[in-house]
Image (spheres, coloured by chain):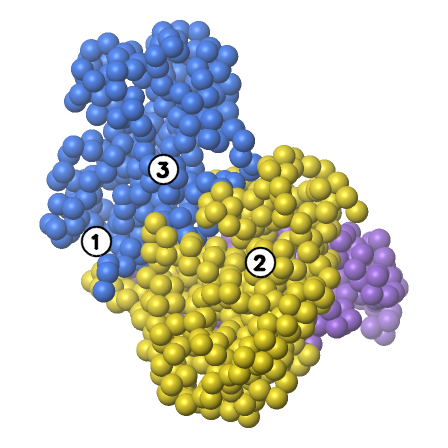
Amino acid sequence: MAFVLPKSELRRVIDELSKDYRVFRPVAKGSEFVFDEEGEPAMDYDTTILPPKKAFLPPEETMFTFKRETFHVEEVTDEKPVAVVGIHPCDLRALHLLDKVFTGEFVDPYYMRRRQSGFVVAINCVKPCEHGFCTSFDAGPGAKEGYDLLLTDLGDKYLVEVGSDRGKSFVDRLGLDSASSADVEKAKELVEEAARSMARRIDTHGLVELLRMRIEHQHWAELEARCLSCGLCNVVCPTCYCYNVVDKLDLGLNEGARIRTWDSCLLLEFAEVALGGNFRRERSARIRQRILHKLLHFVDQYGEFGCVGCGRCVKYCIKKIDPVEIVEVLRGGA
Amino acid sequence: MAKPKVAIFKFASCGGCQLQLLNIEDKLLDIIGAIDIVYFPMGKSENLEGPYDVGLVEGAITCAEEIERIKKVRASCRILVALGACACYGGIQSSRNWMPQRELEPKVYEHWEALSSTKCFGIDEYVPVDLHLHGCPVDREELLEVIKGLLMGTRAYLRPHSVCMECKLRENECLFLKGIPCMGPVARAGCGAVCPSNGAPCSACRGPANDANVESFVESLKEMGIPDEQIARMFRRDASTAKPFAKVVSMYG
Amino acid sequence: MTENPFIPKPAVIKAIKQQTHDTKTYTLAFVNEEDMKRFSFKPGQFNIVSVFGVGEAPFSITSDCEEREFFEHTIRRVGTLTGFLDGLKVGDIVGVRGPYGRGWPLEDAKGTDILIVAGGIGLAPLRPVIKHIARHRGDYGSLEILYGARTPGDMLFTDEFDEWRKISDTTLRLTVDAVPKGVEWPHRVGVVTTLFDELSTKPENAVAFVCGPEIMMRFVVRGLLERGFSKSSIYLSMERRMRCGLGMCGRCQIGPKYVCRDGPVFTYEEIAPLPDKIL
């Protein structure tokens, strides 16, 4: 089931969604892009600084408020559900991976509520981004599932594919025209062409078995000298999910809030335990944790690779530490 | 519980950190409800003698008289807090440490013969410090967290990692990647990346992050084409008494 | 709306018992009877204890799991939260959520001999095991407990030792690293592996339950392997910092294992190939 949306009508999509949702969309910020709740959508963006997971798992959120004296607790819930317009296939797949973490054996009520009530308009990539390697993980450049609506830029208009009942009724509300089979075919070609021109790739063939044998490898020590342990790669990663929890009190010291914030396994304090112990005191152990968690441990935990190849970690890394390069070195090539 | 008696002392500094205390005026009334500021020459006219429960010290130690005074301050305070870059690392005036006094003094003073200034240090060069509150000036939110922690008998969470994480969370364009030498990757966070968020590179006024990889960072500065002299200047600015920074200054200065 | 697992339930401190100079056992009961009725745990599981405004952290449950009126935590004063807990009095309220994790395999261990090796505060999560075996004595073979601490004054549950010795077919062997002047100490001196030369448990039909500082467990594991215990018969209770207890916050991961959800009790076989440990 496919429709077409004239590009001039995109604004109407956002306005219509805004009636029921807080609508995150990519907007320009200097020479970069960010997902924001305001501003003109820049649908041909390459990537955003923070991934759109921030709509479902905010960098900082209040879990509940409390009163110390009475032990009164009040759960904090959102007023309005969230919609994300213009999410790339890699980031969409990242949400699927986060779903596994947060709605598996145990359920994170905050994340789950936002996902269940959320609306996702994805957009296929018709030109490869500079740092991405999404084809390695079948995470792009075309989206396969997990969207309510999926757009493909056909030049003067978008092809709109429907992925859910909610998406269908929204399309009905907009009153869009049906797409021709030529439109559908053109979109398919554009995505295939984008896939062919992707320059970067991690060879995942036998990767899990290989990495199991590379837990001890000199390359980790080489990265020790290079990495700044700034934690930036964790912050920009669409599949990083670790969080910290802190209590914040008001000045009366009675009322306060329990707040969680994104955390980073690259930081020295992340694996600290009582009495000053630290199980990842070396930067090499922390880089290894990040890389192996994505490419090995996540597979053991959830049955899929934990990387989607969005390329943000290398794009924003001052030292250009690159998972593609690391895997090549560990494979013994390049 | 009796209200904790708090004293605020000034050493060699601009007064900006004490100003931050006054700047939380909206909250200060609440604070005053919970604590008793009994000594604060910059903020009030009546000031009481010690002992005090908590001493907040602004400023660096730059002469023999100050060495003697900080030791007395330490003795009069149960908990001593170093307030700001000067008290933590010597601050901007510590950049003079890298020049001999005999060359430095005549540059500044006509009658330098009468001076008895020493190299400039943070207060913990001379006395034990219970808590360091970094920044030039200190961050108001952190200041409030520390005060609340002192009242609760807990330790406030002060971000020990580099500024980059806070900067990215604010979705700033990376100045470093745009070719502007920014100290963010090696500087201690807690400021909310206030300078880069306003387009100015971080100057590491909070000193080094807990795991600052200065060697790797300097390598990147050199690749960027930053001359040695400028590298030394960047690391000398506010916290060159901190070991990881001192190492760079002595290598490139 | 389903219940939010992150919201702790109020529990009142019913009693506090000083164990050592820095360690206390807190007897707690949920304020709401319903919460208390629903609460049941297995030996080796833990709760996350909260003090609003200070934070929360995991603590193993140290009481008898068949005791349904209250539960206990034995907590050493080492940081901010434990320092705050140390200042609390009987009648004060804390927040508790749990129980979490996979405990000691007492079902699978039926019919086998049981060796317990504990160091310092590491005896806390093993106390429910001892109490369980005492209650169901016929289900298990011999019980041997090796316990080491820094000094005699650092030993936990000393007033229960006589009771434990009275459990049939049970041996309790004690050692300390050092004996302060003027203290009488009729037992061994040295790290806990010193006791291995007295070890009577045969590895053929036995399991070892080990808990203590990771560096101590490292030497215990080596000693047990030398004495013929298999990797899969050695069980260890691991400690990592955690924020959620539900396998989400990511803090406690060792390789692919979440200590909170997959542990805290693991076999040495599971732990051995993993990175970032001292073991």
A193 with respect to C259 (left or right): right
Quadrant of residue A75 within the rendered picture? bottom left
Image quadrant containing the C terminus of chain B: bottom right
* Quadrant of the snapshot with the N terminus of chain B: bottom left
Q: Position of residue A298 (x, y in %)?
A: 51, 47
Residue bearing mark 2: A138
Rendering colour (chain B): purple
Q: Residues within 10 Å of mark 2 (few under 14, many from 20)?
A: some
**Residue C46 visible in the current orientation:** yes
Q: Which residue occupies the foreground of this view, C17 or A56? A: A56
Q: Is residue C165 left or right of residue C182?
A: left
Give me the C-alpha separation between circle 3 and circle 2: 49 Å
Q: Which disc number belongs to residue C76?
A: 3
Q: Is residue B161 above or below residue A3?
A: above
Tell me the amino acid under the disc marked 1: Pro
Residue located at (41% from left, 31% from top): C266
Residue B120 lies, with reference to residue C49, above or below; the image says below
Residue C256's x, y, as percent? 49, 42
Picture disc at residue C10: 1
